[in-house]
Amino acid sequence: MVSKQPLAERKVTLGSQLNDQGMKRGTLDASGPLDDEGRFAYRLNVVGEGGDTFRDHVETERYGVAPVLSWEVNDVTRITFEGDFMRNNAPLDRGLTRYANQTSTASRDTFFGEKSVGKLHNDNNMAQLRFDHDLNADWKLGGGVQLLDGSLQGNAIEANGLAADGRTLGRNFNYRKLEWTDRDVQLNLTGHFSAGGFDHTLLTGVEYEDYDYKSIIQRSSGAVGGYPIDIFNPVYGQARPALTRTTTHDKENLKTWAAFVQDQVALTERLKLLGGVRLERFEHDYDSFLPGTSSWTASDNAVTPRVGLSYDLTDTIAVYANTARSFKPNSGASRLGGGFKPEEGKSYEIGTKWEALEGQLSVDAAIYQIEKRNVLTTDPVDSTFSVAAGEVRSRGLDLNVVGNLTPEWRMMGSYAYVDAEVTKDNTLRSGTRLMNIPEQTFSLLNVYEFQEGTLRGLGLGGGGRYVDQRAGRTANVAFSMDSYTVFDLLAYYKVNQHVKLNLDLKNVFDTEYEEGAFGNVYAYPGAPRTVQVGIAYTL
């Protein structure tokens, strides 16, 4: 996450947005120095939004405060505090069901929950303190501490299964309370020096992370006929069933110690070699409090190297190649009660970067292959659990173009081709596609802003995105989400140096599509045609 940093000059911007679906949003972005010398500075971002959505009976709220304080202690030492405090209130809305025996898919605005159940309350808090200290002209010491704290609590409704008639959905009423805390400490040293006749840029450091998570989920009956609702003609207002079973009650702790070193060597003025290695130690404790389940502990050591090579063909064109290994402990427990082996991976990438039009246009392209083992995916038997796929592979092409073609015309475009599939597993067939990953995606946005004349300050833009067909689950038999193309239009007008107006039209042709799948049987619908207007005022 890249936060907005303090500005050297005072600036305050107030913003307001609303759309025809019922959503309202207000923002504040304030920044500037706190003393005459400019050594103390701040930035404060505040957001509040809420209202109706295109989904029936789904109203959401979100509030956030993100302060940043910077202190230039002296000419060589800088200290920064950052915070991010969010409050989200929204019902659990998985989307539409896609059971194999459904007669058809419900309309995109249909909600399978109950308004009377209320909202889930999600709190997320982040506080970070970091420093940078110049030891001399070539060496810099940096580091920091970070605390993440969050919770998700409230009532919800989820699907049990679909009756033989293809339209009556069995549901369960449930209560959940999830809590997590993550504590991080990092210290690193960066330096430039010469050795062996070559110039070096060295990065080395140590890290420590301590992550805690605990959860409890209680549910009503899981019977297919329980708490029923007609997905094509829902009637709301049924009495809540009793919570009769606890399906999740656990806690876990993951501690990580790491040390790393990386050296970039300038073999020539244009050719650079990068090599690095990361050493990690993981200690993982899991406790389950459900009858008939077991607790476990695990520990691992990992060594993950990386190597890269880059060459500047010209002052504006560079090519590169790199390879790396990865290692990540998997959290949670399987349906059978045991833990998962760590996720291991290796990647290869070759690419090029081009700064065109005197640096106004950036073009980059890359081909890659990523191979991983023990990747978690939804359990096909019980979607409340995960299973680890044996081996998966993702390979493809990325192309991105961003920049100004002229002083008035800005363009952003991207294309991606991804072949992501299971290559080896005891249950899944080789060639099984990974869920939610389209084979091809394409997006393009063009914005033209008039610089002179009576239309000066007026910006007009349009764009579109294409998303290919996707698998709805990682399984031998899976439902498919169709490909789609969505177009958007935008306009803004800078009335003066203080006021900016905007008008956006999203999903111009009111295309019906599905954004993504969840839990083996859900697909979330995309928003319909939406008109949004707004104003920003800078003091």
Image (cartoon, rainbow, N blue to C red):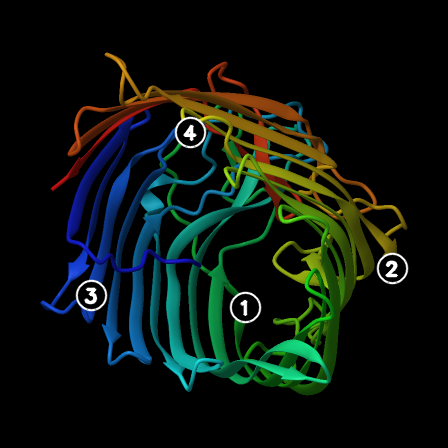
How far is the residue under mark 2 from the one under mark 3?
A: 55 Å
How far is the residue under mark 4 from the one under mark 2?
A: 43 Å
> Answer yes or no: do the residues labelled 4 and 3 have beta carbons within 8 Å?
no
Q: Tell me which amino acid carries mark 1.
A: Thr
Asked if 341 appears above or below 389 in the picture, the reply is below
Which mark sits nearer the N-terminus, 4 or 1?
Answer: 4
The residue located at (48%, 75%) in the rendering is 213
Q: Tell me which amino acid carries mark 2.
A: Asp
Which part of the image, by quadrant, shows the N terminus? bottom left
Query: What percent of the width, then of the height, locates residue 466?
Result: 62, 27
- Residues 79 and 504: in front is 79
Asked if 115 appears above or below 393 in the picture, the reply is above
Asked if 378 appears above or below 419 in the picture, the reply is below
Q: Residues within 10 Å of mark 4 (few under 14, many from 20)?
A: few
The residue located at (39%, 76%) in the rendering is 146
Q: Tell me which amino acid carries mark 3.
A: Ala
Query: Does any portion of residue 523 appear in the rendered image?
Result: no
Residue at the disc numbered 4: 235
Residue at the disc numbered 3: 41
| Discs 4/3, front | 3
Quick one: SS at disc 2? loop
Residue at the disc numbered 2: 425
Quarter occupied by residue 304:
bottom right
